[in-house]
Image: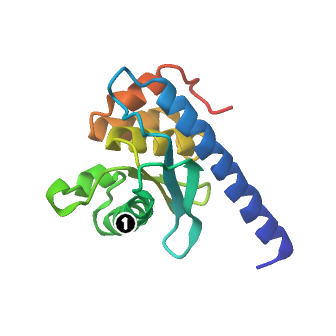
Amino acid sequence: MSHCAAARWMRYICEVETAFVEAVAEVKAVAMPGELRPDDNGCRVGLQMLDRVLIDRMLVGEITNGKDENYQFFSNEKAVRVLEKYVERGDVSSFQSADFDAKKFPGAIIALDANKRPHAYTCSAYPWKFDEAICLLTAYKVGNLTKLQAIAIANISSNEIFMRVAATLPDVAA
């Protein structure tokens, strides 16, 4: 990889990391009383492609409930699963392959980059609709989803948390 290509990847990764941090705060801000647990202070987020992990279970905030290892595991599992199901059958949300009994939770989405390569955005720690909303907002913020594309994915899972966020978004990311 050339130095320029490596620099572009690093800029992109930094942009996504920043967008995740902003998205966590913005999505939590739309929570209604009782929707989040008192110990919902942090989460694990990630970004993966078919051939590489770009952001590996990054910590956003502080996890104080002793479940950090679980959140790391589920963050990775969701990303791997949604990428596999995207290739197999075109899924764009881990909601489409969720199995709560088997501990396969929603909270990851697929968004295509400018070169039409799938990127799996994943989040784990909050109730799953918050996890998914954080991923959708992050992909929107970095320009890999339009507002309408993000809403279409949120509609698959009837994600009213993201719809609250979407109501405040311009049609084009800033």
Q: Is residue 7 left or right of residue 88?
A: right
| Residue 46 or residue 85, whichever sits in front | 46
Task: Give the amino acid type for the residue marked by disc 1 in the picture.
Answer: Glu
Q: Is residue 58 above or below residue 151?
A: below
Instruction: Work out which quarter of the rendered image holds the N terminus and state it.
Output: bottom right
Q: Is residue 91 visible?
A: yes
Q: Secondary structure at mark 1?
A: helix
Q: Quadrant of the C terminus?
A: top right
Q: Residues within 10 Å of mark 1 (few under 14, many from 20)?
A: some
Q: Residue at x 72, y 64 (%)?
A: 9
Residue 143 visible in the shown view: no
> Where in the figure is residue 94, as x and y percent of width and height?
32, 54
Seen at 28% across and 54% down, the residue is 105
Q: Which scheme is used to colour this image of the protein? A: rainbow
**Looking at the image, which residue is at 25% across and 52% down?**
96
Per the image, the residue denoted by label 1 is 77
| Coordinates of residue 137 in the picture (x, y in percent) | 52, 38
Residue 85 percent location from the top left of the image: 31, 65
Q: Is residue 85 above or below residue 174?
A: below
Q: Quadrant of residue 10?
A: bottom right
Query: Which residue occupies 37% across, 53% down?
Result: 92
Residue 102: where, in percent of width, then height? Answer: 18, 63
What residue occupies the far left of the structure in this picture?
Answer: 101
